[in-house]
Amino acid sequence: MIKSKFSILLVSALGTFSTFAFAGGASCGNPATVVKTASESTSAAKVQAIKYSNLSTELKQAVENFQERYPKTQVKLFSLTPVKGIFEASVGKEVIYFDSSARFLFSGRLLDMDQGVDLTEKRVRDLRRIAFNSLPLDKAVKTVYGNGSKKLAVFTDVDCPYSRKLAQTLKDLKDTTVYTFLFPLESIHPKARAKSDAVWCAKDSSAELSKALKGDDIKALANNPLCSSVVSDVIRLAAEHGIGGTPTLINEAGDRISGALPLEKLQNFVDAQKS
């Protein structure tokens, strides 16, 4: 019973951590959801088999204690931290910390104040990074600003007020091609799905998207599986990457952030190089 309660608390804690650590501004839904696919679990097992034989004695004992207490928790990687007696576990796309007995766990930020470095943010950014070229850009609405030399992907719910606010800022970006993935959050915006289908199948989807994000009336389509299938694919794509809120942005470096960012922060995010 205790372990069962822990599992619930762990998922809840990770969800909360995701929200405050990677939300750049207000957003609709949950900016990041803790999702574990079958492939992730398989990969985790492979990583464990390879890595654990090479662990230090101290870390190996801590890992054994963790696995004994929480056998159902799939961990991608265990690591030492700069803090003696505190260890790191990568769970899904999030990070938790634990002591050598694995009795005490916490989620939050580990800061190196001497170096001015957020160690947790760096680790989770790596875990959550998405290879931009792996995104199915043919399933996104393409809008070009300036010469379009830079690229940005945005997961958008056309009825989300924060997606609408971001859309007004995107227009001021310098030389950027924006790929908008139509991601309706039907639980809070029940009309967004029909609008998304209509935007995708419009003759000029970029213009129709602009209308939808301004709150203009969008003519709903009769049930058209060709239109609906692309939006369904985007919903699955978002789930695979743990994206649960809008707007969620991904730059060419593969970093992600959520919320209606102000222009300066948005431009810096677009310009960022992989670190």
Image (spheres, helix red, strand yellow):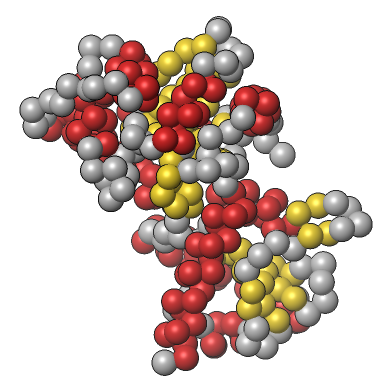
Q: Which of 224 and 65 is in front in this view?
A: 224
Answer with left or right where residue 25 lies relative to residue 121: left
| Residue 34 in the image, given as x and y percentages of width and height | 46, 60
The residue most toward the right is: 114
**200 lies above or below 129:** above
Placement of 29 over or under 218, stated as above or below: below
Q: Position of residue 11 (x, y in %)?
A: 47, 70
Q: Which residue lies furthest to the top in this view?
A: 147
Report the residue at 54% width, 88% height from top.
68
Figure quadrant of the N terminus: bottom left
Quarter of the rendering occupied by the C terminus: top right
User: Nearest the camera: 61 or 207?
Assistant: 207
**Residue drawn 36% across the image and 43% down it:** 237
- Please state which of residues 59 and 229 is positioned toward the viewer in this rendering: 229
Q: In this view, does 91 lie to the left or right of 139?
A: right
Front-lying residue, 205 or 128: 205
Residue 260 position, x and y percent, is 53, 34
